[in-house]
Image (tube, helix red, strand yellow):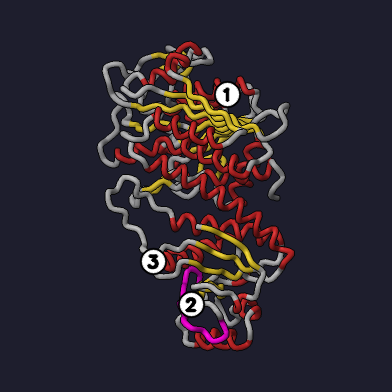
């Protein structure tokens, strides 16, 4: 959808639908004070009928409202005025956009509530509006022979502010919101594709397309022979059971000074995970195409970064493979040697994500990173601990962990830190190798992070377990998380947001 901003009077704006926010209670908010007397009176009369009370998520469509140029007026409930935040706008905007997308309105204009009286509040609200709208409009129908799309989809939204001094803030928020939403949609598209299309080689080809679009980005993909020469025995042990060759995708974005050390993002790219010899149950195994959501989110973040031309150096690394049962696949009890030289006893072949990540994390050392953040649909234990709302966060650096936590809070993509200490690391002790790839039944999300931590001692590192947040269960579909969290972190590092 196309977005723009105007500072003209809302009642004089020619649009197919004017969206006005209404608060819950006797005082609907100061938005009506921005309208002429006839328009305000007509809307107050409609509110007195009781069909709209201002509760969050409510909508009421009015037609031919006296004193308003727009063809329609949609009232959306914003909830209680005292508790209004950027987050509270999300459900209201999603409902409005969904309704308008199914009717004949192809453009709309939304009046920003005058209660948003600071630049930071306006920025957060506008960015949330864009992310909410784009999330609601997203469709994945690439694999359908018939596209079930609205005949006249909503194509333009104008955000109206009565303050000219806020116009630049709105424009900045629109640019950031659209780039983040575009990155999220790319991550969704890649993750929603089936495993027979989105193979490791396909994932590499899509990353290279991004590299071709940006002069600041260089993309390469290491082959299995190249990885073998580097000693990536852990990663290659996973791909041995598949006919699809593994790839190590490396995306280097250089937007900052040459001597600035880069931030490195590492994303798990299991394009399909059957569990290997430790075969998963058949129920919901189709969802294992989503085991590359971490890699997809890293690629989506690199796209958003390049679109905004952020003044930062950033490297994205995506180890991509399949995990299937085959005569050459890992067997429980096998011992493999990682790129770091550590030997690993494979007690469960379904704990393969950490095997491909550990070699990628060792490879990240060559970039002399300022910090490394890995993103992975790593453990079902994290879903048990935090559900489907909050991403698991573990780290070897308190400042980096706090930076990620604050970024998630600022953009409504939350994460929560879990402990990680020597008591948990002992669960990975092996009688036959340097460490085992699982640590028993207890604290599975933590011991998985402890495993990765053994390969990250040379730099600041954080781990995001998105097993519960990377895709929706039941009503299936990728979410695009944590692209917003990662982008908020990058924007803050570039001092483009507070």
Query: Mark 3 or mark 1: which is in front?
Result: 3
Per the rendering, the mark at residue 389 is: none
- How many marks the image carries: the answer is 3
Q: Is residue 388 left or right of residue 43?
A: left
Residue 349 visible in image:
yes
Residue at the disc numbered 2: 72
Q: Is residue 85 left or right of residue 495?
A: left
Q: Position of residue 190 (x, y in %)?
A: 42, 40
Residue ID at (56%, 35%): 394
Q: How many residues crowd mark 3 within 10 Å: few (<14), some (14–19), many (20+)?
A: some
Per the rendering, the mark at residue 364 is: 1
Q: Is residue 490 left or right of residue 447?
A: right
Q: How many residues crowd mark 2 within 10 Å: few (<14), some (14–19), many (20+)?
A: some
Residue at the disc numbered 3: 102
Q: Position of residue 135 (x, y in %)?
A: 47, 55
Q: Nearer the viewer, residue 52 or 426?
A: 52
Comes first in the chain, label 3 or label 1: 3
Q: Nearer the viewer, residue 158 or 421?
A: 158
Residue ID at (56%, 81%): 68
Q: Which residues are magenta?
A: 55-68
Q: Position of residue 106 (x, y in %)?
A: 46, 66
- Real-space Cα separation, disc 1 to disc 2, in angstroms: 54 Å
CB within 8 Å, label 3 to label 1: no
Q: Nearer the viewer, residue 394 or 153?
A: 153
Q: Position of residue 481 (x, y in %)?
A: 49, 45
CB within 8 Å, label 1 to label 2: no
- Real-space Cα separation, disc 2 to disc 3, in angstroms: 14 Å
């Amino acid at each position: 959808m196309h977005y723009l901003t105007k500072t003209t009077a809302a009642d004089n704006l020619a649009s197919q639908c004017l969206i006005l926010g209404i608060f819950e209670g006797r005082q609907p908010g100061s938005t009506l004070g921005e309208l002429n007397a006839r328009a305000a009176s007509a809307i107050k009369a409609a509110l007195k009928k009781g069909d709209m009370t201002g509760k969050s998520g409510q909508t009421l469509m009015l037609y031919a409202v006296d004193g308003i140029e727009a063809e329609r007026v949609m009232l959306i409930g914003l909830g209680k005025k005292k508790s209004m935040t950027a987050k509270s706008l999300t459900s209201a905007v999603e409902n409005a956009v969904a309704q308008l997308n199914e009717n004949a309105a192809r453009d709309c204009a939304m009046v920003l509530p005058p209660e948003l009286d600071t630049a930071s509040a306006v920025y957060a609200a506008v960015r949330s509006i864009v992310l909410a709208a784009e999330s609601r409009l997203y469709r994945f129908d690439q694999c359908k022979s018939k596209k079930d799309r609205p005949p006249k989809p909503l194509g333009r939204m104008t955000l109206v502010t009565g303050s000219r001094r806020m116009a630049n803030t709105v424009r900045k928020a629109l640019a950031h919101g659209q780039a983040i939403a575009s990155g999220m949609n790319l991550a969704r598209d890649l993750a929603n594709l089936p495993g027979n299309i989105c193979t490791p080689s396909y994932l590499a080809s899509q990353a290279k397309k991004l590299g071709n679009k940006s002069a600041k980005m260089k993309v390469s993909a290491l082959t299995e022979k190249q990885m073998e020469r580097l000693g990536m025995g852990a990663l290659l042990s996973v791909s041995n059971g598949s006919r699809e060759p593994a790839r190590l995708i490396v995306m280097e974005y250089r937007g900052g000074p040459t001597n600035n050390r880069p931030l490195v993002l590492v994303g798990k790219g299991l394009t399909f995970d059957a569990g290997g010899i430790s075969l998963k149950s058949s129920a919901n195994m189709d969802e294992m195409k989503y085991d590359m959501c971490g890699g997809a989110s890293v690629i989506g973040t690199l796209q958003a970064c390049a679109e905004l031309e952020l003044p930062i150096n950033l490297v994205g690394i995506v180890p991509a493979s399949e995990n299937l049962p085959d005569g050459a696949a890992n067997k429980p009890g096998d011992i493999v040697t990682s790129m770091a030289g550590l030997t690993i006893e494979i007690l469960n072949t379904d704990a393969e994500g950490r095997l491909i990540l550990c070699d990628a994390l060792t490879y990240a050392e060559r970039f002399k990173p300022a910090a490394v953040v890995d993103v992975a649909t790593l453990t079902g234990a994290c879903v048990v601990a935090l559900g489907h709302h909050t991403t698991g966060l573990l780290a070897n650096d308190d400042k980096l962990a706090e930076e990620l936590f604050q970024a998630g809070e600022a953009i409504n993509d939350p994460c929560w830190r879990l402990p990680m200490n020597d008591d948990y690391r002992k669960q990975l002790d092996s009688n036959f190798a340097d460490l085992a790839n699982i640590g028993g039944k207890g604290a599975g999300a933590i011991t998985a992070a402890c495993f990765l931590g053994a390969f990250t001692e040379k730099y600041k590192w954080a781990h995001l377990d998105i097993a519960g947040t990377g895709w929706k269960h039941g009503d299936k579909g990728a979410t695009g998380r944590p692209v917003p969290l990662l982008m908020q972190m990058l924007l803050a590092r570039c001092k483009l947001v507070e």
